[in-house]
Image: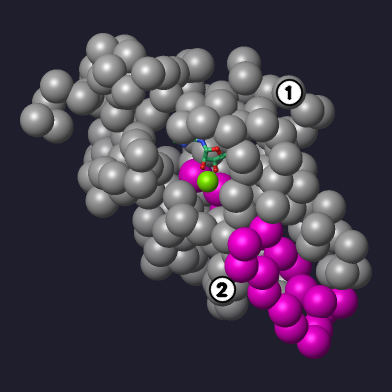
Amino acid sequence: MLKSIIKNILVSEEEIDTIVTRLADEISRDYAGKNLVLVCVLKGSIMFTIDLAKKLDTVCEMEFIRTYSYGNATESSGEVKILVDFDRPDFAECDFLILEDIVDSGNTLKYLVEHIMSKGPKSVKTCTLLDKPSRRKVDFDPDYVGTVIPDEFVFGYGLDLFEKYRDLPYVAVVSPDYLASRGL
Ligand code: IMP
Ligand code: MG
C-alpha cells in the first residue's frame, strides 16, 4: 500500500540524522551564551524540532506555533494564517530560531519572521530541514538549510500527505500516479 504511494526515498533516516547533527552543531556554536528559543512550526516540524533539540549542546526553550495556508495539498495560495500562537513577556530578551520542515513558496517563513519581529525580539532567524528554492514566490532565504531538494512533492518525517504518513522516519517523493488519483 505505502509502496504504491512512494516514488522514491529522497532523504533516508541516516541522511536525516547526519543533516540534523550538522545543523545542531552549527546552531549550538552560533547560539552559545544567547537566549535561544526554538519555534516549532506545527505540525510539519515536530520530528525535526525534537531531533534537533536533542542534539543541541546549548540551553534552549521551546515554543509552538501553528500556521495554515489556504490552497490544495501541493500548492499554497500565499495567504498565511496563524491558528495557534504563543506569547511571552520577555520577547526583547529572546533569540528566536524558527524551525520549518520545508520552504516552498517562502510565504510561511516570511510571514512568521515578520510576525515575531513585530513583537520586538532580540533576534529572529530561520532553519529549515528541506528547501525547494526553485519554487520560491517571495524573496526569502532561510539562515540554516538542511538540504536542497528538487521540485517534487515530498512526505514523511513530519511532512504529511493528506494529513497521513507524518510518522515515517524518512522523506519520500510521492508517486505521480497517486497524486493523479487524488485529482492533483
Ligand atoms: P511555503 O509557505 O509555500 O514556503 O510552504 C511551506 C509549507 O507548505 C510547509 O511548511 C509545508 O507544510 C507545506 N509544503 C510545502 N511543500 C511541501 C511538500 O513537498 N510536502 C509536504 N508539505 C509541503
Ligand atoms: Mg509546514
Residue 87 belongs to the span the image colors magenta:
yes
How many tags in the picture? 2
Disc 2 marks which amino acid?
Met
For the residue pair 89 and 77, the one nearer the viewer reads as 77
**Residue at image location 58% in from the left, 33% down from the top:** 71
Segment tinted magenta in the rendering: 82-101
- Quarter of the image with the N terminus is top left
Q: Is mark 1 within 8 Å of ligand 1?
A: yes
The picture places residue 14, in percent across and down from the top left corner, at 25, 40
Residue indicated by mark 2: 62
> The C terminus is located in which quarter?
top left
Residue in the image at 62% along x and 16% along y: 134
Q: Nearer the viewer, residue 65 or 131?
A: 65
Give residue 153's position: percent from left, percent from top. 42, 24
Seen from the viewer's position, the closer of residues 179 and 113 is 179
Measured as percent of width and height from the top left, residue 89 is found at 80, 87
- Residue occupied by mark 1: 137
Residue drawn at point x = 37 percent, y = 18 percent: 183
